[in-house]
Image: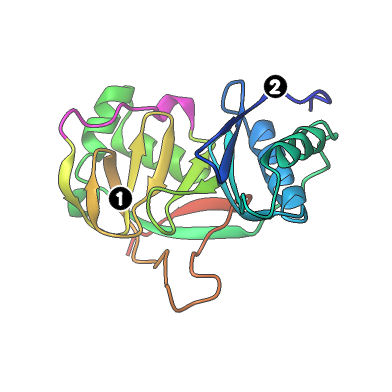
Amino acid sequence: MSNAPPDLLIRPLGEAALCCAVDGTIALEHQQRIWQLAAALAQTEGVLGLIPGMNNLTLTFDPLHADGEAIEQAALALWARPLRRQQAGRLVEIPVRYGGEHGPDLGDVAAHCGLSVDEVVQRHSQAEYIVYFIGFQPGFAYLGGLDASLHTPRRSEPRVAVPAGSVGIGGAQTGIYPLATPGGWQLIGHTALPLFDPTAEPPTLMAPGDRVRFVADLA
């Protein structure tokens, strides 16, 4: 694990927000530094909200009662701190029905990757993934850790409606659609596990730092 953090670029988003972005490739260590920065900034006077993204962190503040430049300098100072040892997140197991009506693109993914359908399912379900951040939809977890042999481009023509619970691959990532929505990821399976419940606390099943495993449901 590197001791020196990558460069952090900070730019204003209007008068009441800042975007802190990592100048580097997507990597778990960079994301862990984003989580650490968010936790530290949560204790900083004047900061109202924190939204982690992939290799970036957006923060909001009240410009009438806080100095944006001072918050920026505080963020840079906090970013320079060494990365603390990260505790393992919760393990969340996701039961998945692969293929058929549940995963209409599984055969196309197998053909693109030069693998059999069974090999795709095996490699997808044997890996352990890390939740980098929640975005796009409430409860949609962007996961790191997809086997490079399964990287598959998004569909050339996105679907108008992707069912809630669909498990897909898009480029170098895999994820689950919590709600029905248009989407262009390759659909390889489906889970009945609810990922977002606005009445629950917390409302999302997964959180940044959690570990995820997909379990093939053979029933």
Q: Is residue 133 above or below residue 194?
A: above
Magenta-colored segment: predominant secondary structure: loop
In the picture, which quadrant includes the C terminus?
bottom left
Q: Is residue 114 above or below residue 133?
A: above
Q: Is residue 77 above or below residue 38?
A: above
**Image location of residue 213, percent across then percent down:** 52, 51
**Image location of residue 177, percent across then percent down:** 34, 53
Q: Residue at 41% of width from left, 59% of height from top?
A: 138
Side of 44 where 12 appears, left or right: left
Task: Look at mark 1 in the image and give the residue it sits on.
Answer: 189
Residue 7 — which label?
A: 2
Residue 37 visible? The answer is yes
Residue 128 visible? The answer is no
Q: Residue at 49% of width from left, 64% of height from top?
A: 204
Residue 82 — which label?
A: none
Q: Residue at 38% of width from left, 42% of height from top?
A: 121
In the picture, which quadrant includes the N terminus?
top right
Region rendered in magenta: 147-157
Mark 1: secondary structure: strand
Looking at the rendered structure, the kind of residue marked 2 is: Asp
Which residue is outermost to the bottom? 199
